[in-house]
Amino acid sequence: MVRAEQLGKQVISPEGPLLILDDINFTIGRGESVAVVGASGSGKSTLLSLLAGLDVPSSGRAWLAGADLGSLDEDGRALLRAQRVGFVFQSFQLLNGLTALENVLLPLELAGQPDARRQALELLERVGLKARARHYPTQLSGGEQQRVAIARAFVGNPDVLFADEPTGNLDQKTGHRIIELLFMLNREQGTTLILVTHDPELAAYCDRILELDDGRLRQEQPASPSQSNVES
């Protein structure tokens, strides 16, 4: 479902060329959950951007949902994301001028999906927020906003979901609830889940852990059997 082959990213800084990622290689299968971990500045978010086609590599290639991202132009990558990909961000990225329902509806309406309202309401009910459908983001707590963001990410039944520090702005108790919700929906829909996190508890829920160190893939390891694969 997702593959990186000798993937690299270099940018020009005032001090000269800066290598952010170097010779990254791995394959992620359909339905797998993978955590990308590492110290700040190790290249985690850059890797997520390359795999999602939000940025282009300086070297190597990446495949997403069977498509070679290097063979697509910007419009082609955007269309692929719209059809096959969901996103959850640390900062929620909800539109403040839209209600919770309208935020979840948006990707369905952009894709021209029939019966979009029913689908959006069903996802809001799944995340426990149907009663808050007409509330705006500023009227919701941080945990509620992230639940709306998760509903929006899953509403189109994406093949791949990318999550960048999805619990980073939440307290521990709320973060744990978000983790359980994220993996519950992931199991139900069979989505491939790739997430960046500093949270060892969140990483342990995944099938595999990829650790970056100064732009290189340091090691790959299975998640702790005692903590991964949370029961429903």
Image (cartoon, helix red, strand yellow):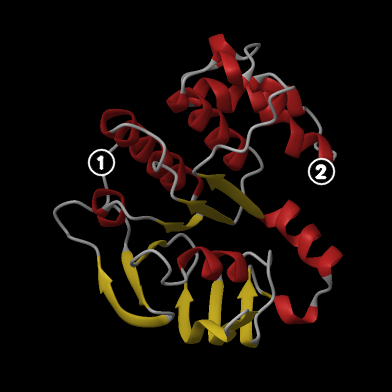
Q: Residue at x 24, y 49 (%)?
A: 201
Give the image location of residue 81, x and y in percent.
71, 57
* Label pair 2/1, CB-CB below 8 angstroms: no
On screen, residue 18 versus residue 143, left or right, reads right
Q: Please tell me whether residue 81 is drawn above or below residue 110 in the rendered image.
A: below
Q: Which residue is mark 1?
A: 231
Q: Residue at x 64, y 32 (%)?
A: 94
Secondary structure beneath dot 1 equals loop
- How many C-alpha atoms fall within 10 Å of the one at disc 2: few (<14), some, or many (≥20)? few
* Separation (CA) of disc 2 from disc 1: 33 Å
Give the image location of residue 26, x and y in percent.
45, 81
On screen, residue 170 versus residue 103, left or right, reads left
- How many C-alpha atoms fall within 10 Å of the one at disc 1: few (<14), some, or many (≥20)? few
Screen quadrant of the C terminus:
top left
Three-letter amino acid code at disc 1? Glu
Q: Which residue is mark 2?
A: 111
**Which is more toward the observer, 89 or 25?**
89
Residue most extreme to the left: 226
Residue 220: image quadrant is: bottom left
Q: Residue at x 72, y 29 (%)?
A: 105
Screen quadrant of the N terminus:
bottom right
Q: Please tell me whether residue 92 is drawn above or below residue 200 in the rendered image.
A: above
Give the image location of residue 25, x and y in percent.
47, 85
Three-letter amino acid code at disc 2? Ala
Give the image location of residue 134, x and y in percent.
66, 11
